[in-house]
Image (spheres, grey):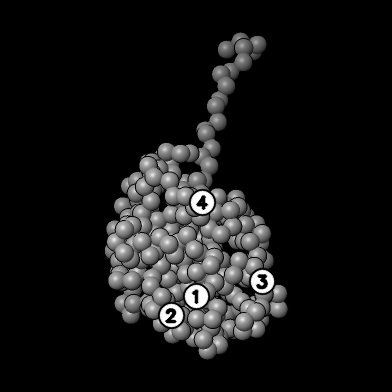
Amino acid sequence: MPSHIAPPARHAAPITKTRVITVGLSGPSSGGKTTTSRYLRSILPNSTIVHQDDFYRPEDQLPLDPKTGLANWDCPEAIDFDAMIKTLTHVKEHGVFPSEFDSLEDKNPVGSHTPADPIPDHILQGWREKIMATIPQDDRAHVKFLILDGFMLYVNEQLRQTIDIKFFLTAPYQILKERRESRKGYATLEGYWVDPPGYFDDIVWPNYLICSAPFVKLTDAMEAGQETGEYKKDSVRPDPMTRKVDMVSSSSSSIDDMVEKVSNLIAQRLPEIYGSL
């Protein structure tokens, strides 16, 4: 080849960027969020959980309930949304938590309604394969799932907009009350928190009714048989908090049934997510 003729250019192989898909599980306290999230971590490939409970403000910065004088852990002001969004952004960009981050929530036991017998691995694997089958072949090795577990994921608009697939796990009042009051306590920045007597009725439930009012309305419609809870592409819910959110009730379901339903809905929603990218 003459020296003045340049050799043909070598085209570098295209760099495939990791696709990060966020899955949110919100709902009232003791609705099954954390248990379901931990199962999803076993089902979804290359997945990480971000717990909203890790972003509570220090106890001395929590607002006090004017009626009881107790620290209010169940209102939006108790959560540092800026810190949560910053951590979420870091995980999406780097695939790991910031080096200074330490999850307290992973040190808390799962709720008392966790089954004595865990879901068998072969069942989880079957759900995993069903979900993977909905992802384009070329993307399967490059997809990462970020699971968000929190009781107020949809109150903050900026946080809400970062979540691709949204769930709201709920149950009737009496079931939630029994589950919450059967728990021993929660690890906190200062040590350990145990609910004082009456805390569910005085703090947890009233705040849930106020802060999640659009979801309370949908839950009532589900219990009355007027609503399935699943959002439809051709219908727009009036409140932005509830748009594109699938409601799942654990009132008459085992945790196995809930995880299966959530897994099936993820498989159903993923083609919509990829179609919008």
Residue 175, located in which quarter of the rendered image? Answer: bottom left
In the image, is 124 to the left or to the right of 105?
A: left
C-alpha gap between disc 1 and disc 2? 8 Å
Q: Residues within 10 Å of mark 1 (few under 14, many from 20)?
A: some
C-alpha gap between disc 4 and disc 1? 22 Å
Counting residues from the N terminus, which is met first, the one under dot 3 or under dot 1?
3
Residue 134 higher or lower than 168, as above or below: above
Image mark for residue 57: 3
Residue 193 higher or lower than 274, as above or below: below
Which amino acid, mark 1? Trp
Counting residues from the N terminus, which is met first, the one under dot 1 or under dot 2?
2
Residue shown at 29%/61% (left/top)?
225
Q: Position of residue 92 (x, y in %)?
A: 57, 52
Which amino acid, mark 4? Pro
Q: Position of residue 230 (x, y in %)?
A: 36, 54
Q: Which residue is mark 4?
A: 240
CB of mark 2 within 8 Å of CB of mark 3? Answer: no
Q: Which numbered disc, 3 or 4, marks the residue closer to the eye? A: 4
C-alpha gap between disc 3 and disc 4? 26 Å
Residue shown at 41%/82% (left/top)?
178
Which amino acid, mark 2? Lys
Disc 1 element: helix
Q: Which residue is mark 2?
A: 177
Q: Which residue is mark 1?
A: 205
C-alpha gap between disc 2 and disc 4? 28 Å
